[in-house]
Amino acid sequence: MIKRKFTLSALVVASLIACTPQKKPEKPDTPEKNVPAVNSGDTTHANTALTAQDAAAFLTMAQHDLEKIQLPAAQASWVYNTNINYDTAAVESYLSEKLSSRASELAKQAAQFNEVDVDFDTRRQLDLLRYSLTMPPPADPDKSERLAKISSELNGMYGKGQYCRNKDECFSLGDMTAFMAKSRDPDLLLEYWKGWREVSPPMKAMFEEQIELANEGAHELGFANVSELWRSKYDMPADEFPATLDKAWDQVKPFYEALHCHVRAKLGEYYGEDVVLQDQPIPAHLLGNMWAQTWGNIYELVKPDQKMDVPDVTNALETQGYDEIKMVKQAESFFSSLGFEPLPDTFWERSLFTKPADRDVVCHASAWDLDDKDDLRIKMCIQKTGEEFNVIHHELGHNYYQRAYKNEPLLYRSSANDGFHEAIGDTIALSITPKYLKQIGLIDKIPDESNDIGMLMQVALDKIAFLPFGLMVDQWRWKVLSGEVAPEDYNTVWWQLREKYQGVKAPIERPADAFDPGAKYHVPANVPYTRYFLAHILQFQFHKALCEIAGDEGPVHRCSIYGSKKAGEALNNMLAMGQSKPWQDALQTLTGSREMDATAVLDYFAPLKAWLDEQNKGRTCGW
């Protein structure tokens, strides 16, 4: 689900795996003679002599410097992520530290133009530069280098993580994820659940040090801490942003609670109500996913009792002879049907589609735009499943978005907000309906509407079940980054929030040294997670709008925009804006509304909600 992009707006470059660099980075380029020198340290006092012309010259210099550094940094990161070893890690760490340090210095310089009267575009680009860093390094070069090394090592620990029963029998995360998706043996599920969480306790001390260093860097940028920095990136005051999330969550919470009630009851029937207590949170290891973030793998346990003709995409892919490349080609054809140009030849030559047998790689799916123009790639260890078929559409959505805004200035080459980037591919995936599957020959007939409850259940088990997890990860992290939660309480508060939002609990008492948040990729990799919550709301809002543009008059959950050039044009008009305008403007361009609204979610799942309410009569709901 993660987007990997090396423009300034997504400087996650220091979050990759590395060993100690061979030497300290060279000093960053100094400003050109015709660019006013600004103090890269203290930003508390604006330089009143600076002018609008100075700001424009500064932005020209800043973008030149960043463009010069970011391509080799991106290339080094790609090499490392597709071939993890000491040397690739050292090179990646060195270049990522150079890029993040220069970006941090420029971000601090940008803050000195805060009181200068400039036009809209100049002000927006200055603000984007200031808000751009995810884990801002301190000005002190030794501390900056240390932060880069910690970030890289944390991701390395995750990427190389495995669980070993003994010296001869070890399991990768991919192995255990596949087992948990299919196994119904509670003892085996618990073993893998516990085993993977043995990877993360060694991360905790470095995670604490990383926060201390990044908060120092954030303070130099003028923020109280990294928490405030992260919440400031959404075209509204940082303290107001959580209320926007709460409003959307409040809209969908009753639906989630109905789904949770039904799932818990069915799990109680299968495993016994002594294992799944009917007035308590659900044990996290029983939901078919290592993190209990999506529940689609337990569909067979919770599906409607009546026989339903639900397409089995995984089986269809096998029957139709789809290999990994053909799966990607089919996803590309969806975008082509909307009027988008084919992916470049280099995409097929340079992407990683399968896990190599001869080296370690970071298998987590990601989309890359290495040169901010046409060097588009995906990195995946594709498994031939229906779920992966959707993930491929998601990742290509990033690539098409990246290409749509490639002609914008550097600082505008990103999505309207980070949730938009995550939403686009998923919006396309919502059109993978039986109608579409029949069009491409994966199924022979379209099931009638009596089967809709089963299909909506499958979607809800992934997308609705995910919403509280997508919300709580950064609820936890904002508290941690601000210092509200002390290190000794990291794990306790993690599970308090998971119980509060998800109604999910740890299946066993957690040891004092546990660091379960570190067992989730995005925590050691420093990838903000709120984007995924936003994406899971926005994709339905986008889908509904596109279906209306395409002229589809049926239920929104049966709509496919496949083949609609009109919908493709409307979508591209929004994508091409990049980050040049506030995200509310981009949203209005496609949907006609400036507000994120979960009503489209409720419309999409309305038949399922009515069915769940009927099933839950007489049950104990809540936790």
Image (tube, rainbow, N blue to C red):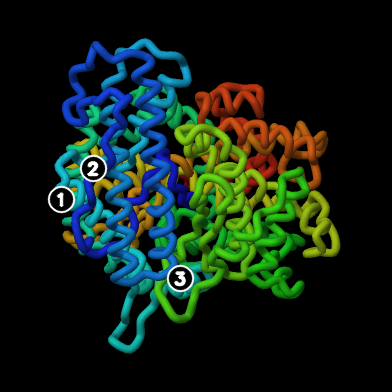
Residue 498 appears left or right of 198: right
In the image, residue 341 above or below residue 179: above
Asked which secondary structure carries label 1, the reply is helix
Q: Write down the residue under mark 3.
A: 174
Q: Nearer the viewer, residue 188 or 480?
A: 480
Q: At x 46% / y 68%, what residue is drawn?
A: 177
Q: Amino acid at mark 1?
A: Glu
Q: CA distance from mark 2 to mark 1?
A: 24 Å
Q: At x 70% / y 65%, what residue is drawn?
A: 312
**Residue 420, position in %: x, y?**
54, 38
- Which is nearer the N-term, disc 3 or disc 2? 2
Q: Amino acid at mark 3?
A: Gly
Q: Is residue 182 visible?
A: yes
The nearer-to-camera label among 3 and 2 is 2
**Label 3 neighbour load within 10 Å: few <14, some 14-19, many 20+:** some
The nearer-to-camera label among 1 and 3 is 3
In the image, residue 92 above or below residue 383: above
Label placed on residue 488: 1
Q: Amino acid at mark 2?
A: Pro
Label placed on residue 137: 2
Cβ atoms at labels 3 and 2 below 8 Å apart: no
The nearer-to-camera label among 2 and 1 is 2
Q: Nearer the viewer, residue 563 or 476?
A: 563
Residue 419 appears left or right of 497: right
**Residue 555, position in %: x, y?**
77, 39
Asked which secondary structure carries label 2, the reply is loop
